[in-house]
Image (tube, helix red, strand yellow):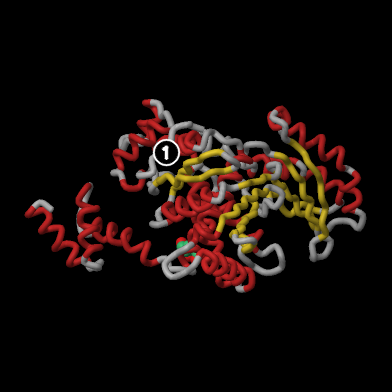
Amino acid sequence: MSKKTFSHNFRKLNISQRKDIASEYFNFTEEEKKIFSEEHDLSDLSDVLIESSIGTFYVPLGLASGFVIDGKEYVIPMAIEESSVIAAASHGAMLVKAGGGFNTWASDPIMTAQIFLIDVSQDAKNKILSAEKQIRETCEKLVPNLLLRGGGFRGLEVEAIEMKNTLCVSIHLDVRDAMGANIANTVAEALTPSLKALSNGKVLMAILTNASEHRKAKASFEIPNKFFRKGSFSGEDVCQRIVIANDLAKKYPKRAVTHNKGIMNGISALTLATGNDTRAIEAAAHFYAQNKGAYQSLTSYEYKDGNLIGSLELPLPVGTVGGSISIWPWAQLSLKMLGNPDAQDLGRIAVCLGLAQNLAALLALVTEGIQSGHMKLHAAKTAYSAGARGGEIRMLASKLWSQKTLDPTIAKKLLKEMKEYGG
Ligand code: MEV
């Protein structure tokens, strides 16, 4: 990563200044700078990525800063339409940095292909398990490039489903830097003839599982309580309230789902910015959240020896090559901003972002609430809706803010006065 310091004032600059700073910080080439420009035409690309394309749909892209992950500084691109999320992520990252940064772990990038067999014979499970060598060889012939990159077959499991004579055959594959859905589905479909023969049954279907439970990443931090003092709350109070809020989300699914949605605000925004499959990431996270018997929060917190200790572990099936990632210019630019990580490192970055997001949300929720932080952004949206553009937006928003109103009629009146009298 760059040795330069990322601007502390980034949020306060105007968009063209931010583009200049980002271009300099990440050493964007002239070609890459064009991706920021309005004229960039992605029609052909969108037409090859999806069917019936009529163009592209824009989502705001922002940069969350202040992340120290395993001793390395990161600025994280996030594509998201929701206000406050990027500010919250940066705030959470800053608190974690004060405690020394995030520590992470990531498993090997294992995805699982599944073949569902029905009307199988009694000895089908044993027959399939004894054919592991032959199954491995079939898999490896299908993915020679993956073998060259160090990936390939990593194991076979056969489960009886609670339905008469029905089996699920799971093939675990190390997919290296790919997201892996395509590889897993290719392998699953290619294995159907041999599994049909071995089971003496019928193939119902063959597809990867989005549970992705063997492709996990984990992040943790430890922050002294003095960094949490807020208003009338002592640092210790705030830390204990955060722990209670998390315990509550472990016990009460209707709170857990909102808690986890906040985590995914960050993770999905990074997933989208890097051209990955947001639905796969969400599916895996929510599967994992219910995996201990009941749906619960994905994070863990404890307060020990004056420190708040937080951690998050979840499946993260993200890739850095293949699919739309390798050809979508914004995805390439986002990966460049992250220092071109491999898939495991992208998973580590994503899990830190989710944890930072959750820390900032809980901190706000158990102290002043989240609405006061949102008000300034709502004022900017009201100013935009009233017709303000460019520098007028901030000017009108600060007038609305100082008058403590979001009334659209007042906003229009103030804008008219600003235009007539110049501010
Ligand atoms: C809003 O998008 C996310 C939060 O609701 C998360 C949470 O409640 O923990 C603030």
Residue 29, compared with residue 220, is above or below; it is: above
Q: Is residue 153 left or right of residue 74?
A: right
Residue 339, compared with residue 286, is above or below; it is: above
Q: In terms of depth relative to the viewer, which is nearer, 307 or 378?
A: 307
| Residue 358 pos. (x, y %) | 53, 59
Q: In terms of depth relative to the viewer, which is nearer, 131 or 148?
A: 148
Residue at 31% x, 60% y is: 376
| Residue 141 pos. (x, y %) | 76, 31
| Residue 305 pos. (x, y %) | 64, 61
> Residue 6: which quarter of the image?
top left
Residue at 47% x, 69% y is: 233
Residue 346, compared with residue 403, is above or below; it is: above
Residue at 68% x, 69% y is: 294
| Residue 217 pos. (x, y %) | 65, 48
Q: Amino acid at mark 1?
A: Phe
Q: Is residue 330 left or right of residue 216?
A: left
Q: Does the numbered disc 1 mark a residue whose Cβ is under 8 Å from ligand 1?
A: no
Is any atom of residue 2 visible in this view? Answer: yes
| Disc 1: CA contacts within 10 A as few (<14), some (14-19) or many (>=20) | some
* Residue assigned mark 1: 6
Residue at 47% x, 41% y is: 75
Q: In terms of depth relative to the viewer, which is nearer, 87 or 99?
A: 99
Is any atom of residue 328 visible in this view? Answer: no
Count of residue discs: 1
> Residue 71: which quarter of the image?
top right
| Element at label 1 | loop
Residue at far left of view: 421
